[in-house]
Structure formats: structure tokens, C-alpha cells
Image (spheres, rainbow, N blue to C red):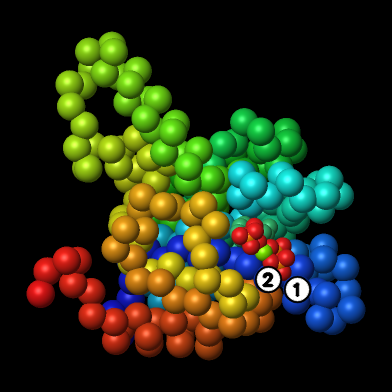
Amino acid sequence: MAIPKHIAIIMDGNGRWAKAQGKKRTEGHKEGVKNVRSIAIYANSLGVKCLTLYAFSTENWKRPIEEVDYLMSLPKVFFHAYLKELMEKNIKVTMIGDINRIPDEARKIFLDAIAKTSKNTGMILNFALNYGSRDEIVKACMAFAKDYKAGLVDTLTEESFNDYLMTAGLPDIDLLIRTSGEERISNFLLYQLAYSELIFRPEAWPDFNKQSLDACLEEFEHRSRRFGGL
Ligand code: IPE
Ligand code: IPE
Ligand code: MG
């Protein structure tokens, strides 16, 4: 099977998953964290080079403070439980997003996981945390303008623009998956998804399992990617 180099996932539907079982929304997020581990380990075993997971958007700050606090406590839960296993599996943790607004504890835990796994050569597990694509594009433009003004660069190309994005250095995204039946991008990787295949799955993120990923890969294999050619 042709394995996509870079898969991005919008992990949606935790809240509805919990509600459907008469539980609190936070229970859905807790279950979602466990699923991050199992899908990451599985993707790594399949030979995926990079897995980018949308964990928290720049718009998710609009949620009730209790839910935001709970979400920000999850990096600790995740890395406490699974960092050892990520190391054993040679997985390298990275992140995109504006790390400055993330509460101290979560930021430190993330930076620690990134540092500890930085020499690993297996799959890149890239978390989009406090990430918004419009924010990213505006920041990229500002960075370019600064370099231009300083005389460091005199032009901008599609390729050199990539280097100003938070995804600089990562392979192009072959496949985007969104769970929970919503069919929208929600400010995720707007520039990078130009020629990605899009798959929308009905199951909520906690229910998205190995078989679900297999089904996505099967569908991906049958897509004919033309990139504008014939
Ligand atoms: C995805 O699940 C997780 C985050 C956005 C942090 P949701 O919390 O959006 O769940 P639904 O969409 O309300 O069911
Ligand atoms: C997108 O899900 C963000 C993440 C999965 C982190 P949302 O649940 O925030 O998106 P909308 O509000 O349905 O567009
Ligand atoms: Mg949602």
C-alpha cells in the first residue's frame, strides 16, 4: 500500500462522543488523549513520516474557561503516560502554533518532550497547539517583511514562503482526515493543504481506530492525484 508521507488529522468530536454516553465533555477529551497515543504508534509502525494533529486552535480560547483549563492540562497527562513509549519507538515530537500564550506548565512539558525526542529519527509527531492558519500566514508575512527590510532577501517565491511557515521543513501534506462528520477546515493549514486529499470520517475522534485509519489509507490509495496535470 502507498503510505502517505504526511498525514494531518483534525481530531474532532470529543465533546459529542462524551455527551452521547451521558458523560461530561472533558471525559471525551480524556479518551481522545488515549487515542492520540494509539493512532500515533500505529501510524509510526506503518512508516508514516509525519503526523500532524490539531489539538487546540486559536479559536478554542472562546470555550468556557473550565474546558480550556482542562485541555491545557492534557499535555502533562499525555507525556507523563507516554513519553517513555514515544522514546522507545524513536518518535520525534514537534509542535506548530503560538507557544507563547500556552500556560507555563503545558509549555514547559511540551518543550521538554521536544528536547528529549529531538534526536529521534522515526515518525515526527507534530502537535498543532494554539494553532491557527491565518495567524501563521500573517506571522510569516511579518517575518518576510522584516527580512526584506533588513536586506536579507529581495524576493519571495512559493518555495521560500514555505520556509516562513511553522511547518517549514516538513513534507507536504498528502492526506487530511477530519473526524466527527464535520466537513470544514476550521483554520487548519490553509496554505499547506492546497493539493492534499481530504477525507471526512463520521466517527468521533475517540472512536477513530486502526481500522478507521486503514480505511482512510485504502481510500487514499485509490485517489488519483493530478496536481493540475493530466
Ligand atoms: C475536538 O473535539 C477537540 C478540540 C477541539 C480541542 P471537540 O471538543 O470539538 O468536540 P465536539 O466537536 O464539540 O464534539
Ligand atoms: C477544530 O475543531 C479544532 C481542533 C480539532 C483542535 P473545532 O471543534 O474547534 O472546530 P469547529 O468550531 O467545529 O469549526
Ligand atoms: Mg468540535
Q: Secondary structure at mark 2?
A: loop
- Is there a contact, CB below 8 Å, between mark 1 and mark 2? yes
- What kind of residue is marked 2? Gly
Residue 61 point in image, percent of width and height: 71, 44
In space, the residues marked 1 and 2 are separated at their CA atoms by: 5 Å
Q: Quadrant of the C terminus?
A: bottom left
- 227 and 171: which is toward the camera: 227
- Horizontal arrangement in the rendering, residue 104 relative to residue 21 (left or right): left
View extreme (top): residue = 150
Residue 43 horizontal side relative to residue 36, left or right: left
Is residue 45 among the parts visible in the rendering? no
Residue 41 is situated, as x and y percent measured from the top left of the image, at: 53, 71
Q: Is mark 1 within 8 Å of ligand 1?
A: yes
Q: Residue at x 35, y 53 (%)?
A: 192
Name the residue that disc number 2 marks: 13
Q: Which residue is mark 1?
A: 16
